[in-house]
Image (tube, grey):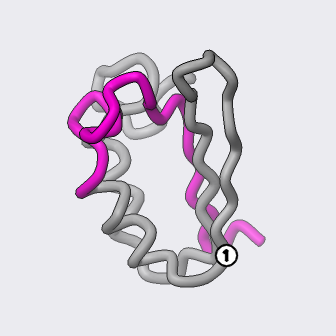
Amino acid sequence: MECQHNCGRNGISRECFQIERGVDDSRLIVTAVQLPTGAIETITNTVFIPEKIGYLMNAYDDQFRLKANQSVKIVGYMIVQATDV
């Protein structure tokens, strides 16, 4: 995945995530989380978006690894704005 914010990073970054989370009209957030088994779990949230984003920012480190279990990491995400639907 390539950064769409020209931050010079290849892949997802916390910096890009912070840019995208600043928009107030988010309709949903989809996260792809790689589990310790290597399987990727896709999670879609359609309500309480600001709270979910707050949780992700607090629970995951700068490399998007879960602080409580470094074997779990976010490998992709998408924030859909009201203008995208």
- Give the camera-side residue of 28 and 24: 28
Q: Is residue 12 left or right of residue 37?
A: left
In the image, residue 61 sits, relative to residue 37, either above or below, namely below
Quarter of the figure with residue 18: bottom left
| SS at badge 1 | loop
Q: Is residue 35 left or right of residue 84?
A: left
* Residue at 44 percent of width and 69 percent of height: 52
Is residue 21 part of the magenta span, yes or no? no
- Give the camera-side residue of 42 and 72: 72
Q: Position of residue 43 (x, y in %)?
A: 66, 53
Q: Which residue is mark 1?
A: 46
Q: Position of residue 53 (x, y in %)?
A: 40, 65
Q: Residues within 10 Å of mark 1 (few under 14, many from 20)?
A: few
Quarter of the figure with residue 84: bottom right
- Give the camera-side residue of 29 and 4: 29
If the image is split into quadrants, where does the N terminus sit?
A: top right
What is the magenta range?
A: 58-85
In the image, residue 47 sits, relative to residue 76, either above or below, namely below
* Residue at 58 percent of width and 47 percent of height: 31
Callout 1 amino acid: Thr
Q: Position of residue 68 (x, y in %)?
A: 28, 40
Q: Is residue 68 left or right of residue 43?
A: left
* Residue at 32 percent of width and 68 percent of height: 54
If the image is split into quadrants, where does the C terminus sit?
A: bottom right
Q: Position of residue 32 (x, y in %)?
A: 61, 39
In the image, residue 40 sits, relative to residue 37, either above or below, namely below
In the image, residue 23 sits, relative to residue 80, either above or below, namely below
